[in-house]
Amino acid sequence: MDSYQNAYMGLPGISPEELHFLQQANAELNENQQKYFHMAYTSKRKSPQDILVFSLVGLFLVPGLQRFIVGQIGMGIAYLFTVGLCFVGSIMDVVNHKSLALEFNRKVAFDSYQIARMSS
């Protein structure tokens, strides 16, 4: 697990909260399952910096882009047709980009955990 913990530390923008739930997800997995988890998680994870960039693009060019990127299609459509909920929602997403990324990454970790458990 130490080798994967070090690999997770190298992920861009990783927070202590994210590292903690990754450690919890890996706790019950054997080494082969940890490999699958690591591959699945790192391929789908979004860094907070990426979400910030998408939020800024969403604020100025394509309202709701950040919501489409994190898989919230309904909110993305709502932002698109209401110009980012009259810019207020888009501004809130710029401010809260880290929590958007963390929420998305938790879902990805859960999905990756399920994939890893089935891989044995």
Image (tube, rainbow, N blue to C red):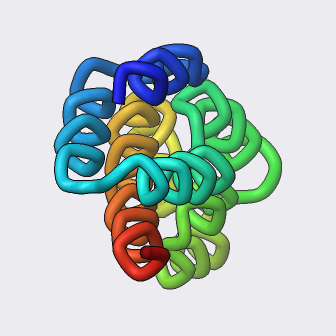
- At horizontal 50% and vertical 33% (from top left) the residue drawn is 94
Residue 40, quarter of the rendered image: bottom right
Q: Quadrant of the C terminus?
A: bottom left
Q: Is residue 61 left or right of residue 16?
A: right
Taking the image as shown, residue 51 lies to the left or right of residue 29, namely right
Residue 15 drawn at (x, y percent): 35, 21
Determine the residue located farthest toward the right in the rendered image. 61
Residue 84, percent from left and from top: 56, 59
Q: Is residue 89 visible?
A: no
> Residue 44: x and y, percent?
62, 56
Q: Indicate left or right for 112 with 66 as reference.
A: left
Considering depth in this image, is 35 or 69 the residue closer to the camera?
Answer: 35
**Is residue 104 among the parts visible in the rendering?**
yes
Camera-side residue: 67 or 17?
Answer: 17
Image quadrant for the N terminus? top left
Above or below residue 9? Residue 94 is below
Residue drawn where x is 19% and y is 54% of the image: 28
